Amino acid sequence: MDIKRFDLPLRASTKSVKQVADAADTEYTLIYTRQTELSWVRFGLERLEQIASDSGAAMIYADHFDGDAPAPVIDYQKGSLRDDFDFGGVQLYRTSALKEAASKMDAEYEFAGLYDLRLRVSEIGPLVHVNEFLYYELETDRRKSGEKLFDYVDPRNRGVQVEMEAACTAHLKRIGGYLEPKFKEVDLNSVPFEVEASVVIPCRNRVKTIGDALRSALSQETDFPYNVIVVDDNSTDGTVDVIKSFLDDPKLIYIAQDKTYHAIGGNWNAALHHPRCGRFALQLDSDDMYSGSDTVQKFVDAFREQGCAMVVGTYRITDFDLNELPPGIIDHREWTPDNGRNNALRINGLGAPRGFWTPLLREINFPTTKYGEDYAVALRVSREYRIGRIFDVMYNCRRWGGNSDGALDIEAVNRNNLYKDRIRTWELQARIALNSR
């Protein structure tokens, strides 16, 4: 076999990547990113090299075993821009592509060298996923999916994230997907509304938490009229009884969905298109609670002051009893007015709670899905419109056993990541087309 192996950490420097490229003198170069032992199933490496040759891949990677447990990975696509995309530990590069990409690396990164290499190689040729289990390694990060979720906003990782954003932004500029900081203006008063804001609470089988959410929403203090729209998607656990116990409050609007498929996105659409929905539709998940009685007021003030079509706030991670959990406050400080919408293609979310200008959302609509629907809408809004920010804590995000993303198995994690990569791919394609016009 015409392969030479090098070991590099995922957070490798530009210097170390270029050293590998200089030393590579075989047809293929294998970069191994784990610190644990690598071993192959019989003829696994030969199979990887064979498919690399047959497919013309610029880089190739494969499903594998984590110890004895299957560890499948997902297909790479144009929108697979996350710096934490899981290739497994083995990345097999066509050496000519590796050298060409490394020769063009013109920024000196301490952490983003391998990420920069991967993006540049993807501009040269395809990154091919072999959905066969070809090798054994050990994953050293054993945290649950809900604990890994916030790594990219952890202040301790800020230096790494600044470099990753720079590398991704440069890639977007090279492929025509970068958006300059130019935005459409919005006339927030262009359409009359009965109330200024609606708190939207989609729910299904949340008997343990829906009461807290409703009390939080209905106790808001504002200098304008608002209402609360709770959309129940065929709950079977007593959630509806709890909702009905609040119906003596005239601010509450209850929507009971029919038996067809809605998911979270469809429940949001039901609220947005309700005739009593307010000018601004504000998120409150049925697990969670606003941090104070002034959250709705802060939202509307931000829309008015910042002249934007969407506002994203700041939240605190807590347990069920509202005790703070690490990493604590999630404020998405990485968001900047000039580059936030470009960096949004690299990260897995824009933050919460979210508020939307209802007339625009009635045109865009949420995708009818139960995961990633908010991310898809935020990317679409940011393509043309300014997104405002509030850096005060407005929301308590409660992590508990009933959360949908607290401890997912690998199949669920892969399914979610594949869908978000598709969302990014579609959005990237639209932005490239927009720029070409």
Image (spheres, rainbow, N blue to C red):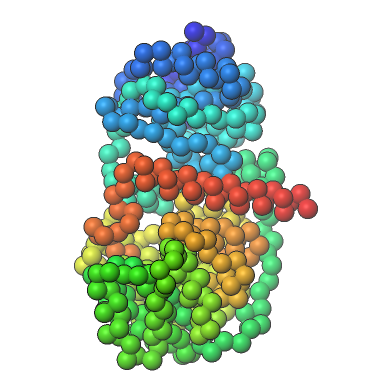
Q: Is residue 72 above or below residue 376?
A: above
Q: Is residue 95 above or below residue 416?
A: above
Task: Give the image quarter of residue 411.
Answer: top left
Query: In the orientation shown, which residue stands out farthest toward the right?
Result: 437
Q: Is residue 70 above or below residue 423?
A: above
Q: Residue at x 50, y 12 (%)?
A: 3
Of residues 329 and 34, the one nearer the viewer is 34
Mark yes or no: residue 108 visible: no
Task: Give the image quarter of residue 203.
Answer: bottom left
Task: Give the image quarter of residue 186.
Answer: bottom right
* Residue 62 % position (x, y): 44, 27
Query: In the orientation shown, which residue stands out farthest toward the top?
Result: 1
* Residue 413 % position (x, y): 38, 45
Q: Residue at x 50, y 36 (%)?
A: 75
Of residues 82 and 371, the one nearer the viewer is 371
Q: Residue at x 24, y 69 (%)?
A: 237
* Residue 41 % position (x, y): 35, 17
| Figure label count | 0
* Residue 172 % position (x, y): 64, 44
Q: Is residue 117 above or below residue 338?
A: above
Q: Residue at x 46, y 13 (%)?
A: 46
